[in-house]
Amino acid sequence: MIRGVVNARREAVVPLQVRGPGGVELDVSAVVDSGFTASLTLPLPTISTLELARVTGGGAVLADGSVRQFDIYAAEVAWAGEWRPVLVSGVGDEVLAGMRLLADHELRIVVVPGGIVEITPLEAPQGTATDR
Amino acid sequence: MPVSGSPRTPEEVARLGEEIFDGKVRPALGAQDDGKFIAIDIGTGDYELDDDDYAAVTRLRARRPTAEVWLGRVGQPAAYRMRQSR
């Protein structure tokens, strides 16, 4: 389980450990963003510190409907006791954890400043809206 | 995955990738491919499709380690969706 906390802006923030191909490891605080469909964004200075390798170009549709293109890098995230390979979007100046990273997990957020955030792996697919 | 520096801007990579997708790839795709990620080598037009973004890019780069790659998503204007990034 990954545990975090809701900040004063009522954003759900979780601690993540990210590793680059050369073994450089960094602790980051990621805002859980259910509107972000990829795994992770990192600011370019952080990508540089981790010495991440650019593996592709790609883009995202923004909330206003426009498309922004950026470089995408390969990294690993510490997850459930293992290093998990992910694609990292090199865009923006904050760390966002997207829904691809959270796929097949349960996300619990107590939405008050200081509230708990818990990300728990699912044993099996469950709890879909159509079940109810 | 091997390193690939690019002399091109992300916008130029996207323009070339979308040209290849529209001209060569899209006619070969079916309804079952809708929503899949597509990694395209913009130098050769070679590509990989997968439900997983990492898998599509990794498989293409394994075959073409020096490729300049663009990642898109079939039926979508871009690979991902996000809010306006600060």
Image (cartoon, helix red, strand yellow):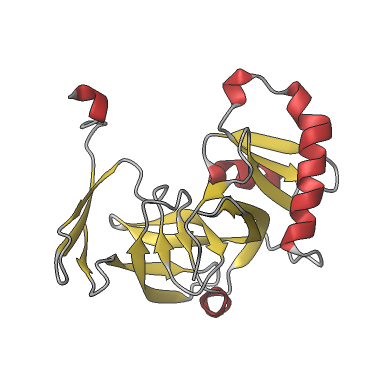
Q: How many labels does the image show?
A: 0
Q: In which quarter of the image is residue A44?
A: bottom right
Residue situated in front as seen by the camera: A119 or B83:
B83
Look at the image and tell me in which quarter the C terminus of chain A lies: top left
Residue situated in front as seen by the camera: A81 or A18:
A18
Look at the image and tell me in which quarter the N terminus of chain A lies: bottom left
Q: Can residue B6 be seen in this view?
A: yes
**Is A64 left, or right, of A101 in this rendering?**
right
Q: Position of residue A75 (x, y in %)?
A: 51, 62
Residue A49, placed above or below residue B47: below
Q: In which quarter of the image is residue B40?
A: top right
**Is A108 left, or right, of A26 in this rendering?**
left
Residue B74, placed above or below residue A91: above
Which residue is situated farthest in the front direction here? A64
Q: Where is residue B14 in the image (x, y as percent from the top left)?
A: 74, 52
Q: Is residue A1 visible?
A: no
- At horizontal 61% and vertical 38% (from top left) the residue drawn is B76
- At horizontal 42% and vertical 63% (from top left) the residue drawn is A96
**Is A61 left, or right, of B28 in this rendering?**
left
Residue A83, placed above or below residue B35: below
Q: In which quarter of the image is residue A113?
A: bottom left
- At horizontal 78% and vertical 34% (from top left) the residue drawn is B22
Residue situated in front as seen by the camera: A87 or B15:
B15
Q: Where is residue A11 in the image (x, y as percent from the top left)?
A: 28, 66
- At horizontal 73% and vertical 37% (from top left) the residue drawn is B47
Q: Where is residue B77 in the image (x, y as percent from the top left)?
A: 64, 43
